[in-house]
Image (cartoon, rainbow, N blue to C red):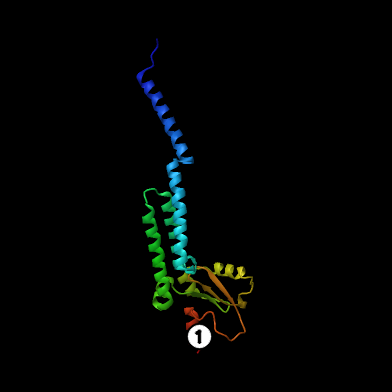
Amino acid sequence: MHLLPRHTLTHFFYIHVRRQQVKNNMATVFHGDWEGIARTLVVGVLVYIILILFLRLSGKRTLSKMNSFDLIVNVSLGSILATIMLNQSVPLTEGVVALAVLIGLQFIVTWSSVRVPWVRRFVTGEPALVLKQGLFLPAALKRARVTEDEVRAAVRSAGLCDLSAVEAVVFETDGSLSVVTKSEGSGASSLADVQEHSKTDDRAA
């Protein structure tokens, strides 16, 4: 009877074990274990209901996207929600506390921003004028790190072709560009809170 060498048997055994490991890993990738699936289902439903309650209590401002601070809050809420649902090492209570803390801080900051001007400036910054009366403002463009081509693209998106028809282009606190067309009206200006525009008006006065 011919016997296989010991190293050959060891090699065959190693291959068999590796194949079994690969098979088990593939099974885990596609469906995991039923306990984990059940936990994700139950925790997902509960944390979704809790998040809705928190958002109803804190108001619509919590999910608004008025500035970069709001974007950070929204992204953080999504990250916390995903962690609670998928990370089994994070208890539901700790995840709920994390959501409550973030929403509570956002409520405090926005409440303070409405009432205290320096808090609003510190958190959200100020809009910047990058084009006025059809003319680019190079210094403002450099500070905002915005190119002239990006401003022209914003003007085209507003349905305008001639820059002389544009009263101003404002780089908003949420990172967007607002295009203001020239108006014959004498009412209050929407550019009153834009620093460069205010300085220009003061010099003209």
**Is residue 173 shown above or below 35?**
below
Across and down, in percent, residue 13 comes to 39, 25
Q: Is the residue 164 above or below the residue 146 in the image?
A: below
* Residue located farthest toward the bottom when viewing the structure as drawn: 205
Residue at image point 37% right, 52% down = 91
The answer to whether residue 74 is seen in the rendering is no
**Residue annotated with mark 1:** 201
Residue located 45% across and 41% down the image: 34
Q: Quadrant of the N terminus?
A: top left
Front position in the image: 123 or 37: 37
Q: Residues within 10 Å of mark 1 (few under 14, many from 20)?
A: few
Above or below, 85 relative to 168: above
Instruction: Choose top left, top right, bottom left or bottom right for residue 16.
Output: top left
User: Where does the image place residue 132, in percent across and percent down from the top left?
Assistant: 55, 78
In x, y percent, where is residue 90?
Answer: 37, 51
Between residues 189 and 62, which one lies in front from this camera angle? 62
x and y percentages locating residue 135 in the rendered image: 56, 77
Residue farthest top in this picture: 1
Look at the numbered disc 1 and give the secondary structure of its residue.
helix
Q: Is residue 103 left or right of residue 153?
A: left
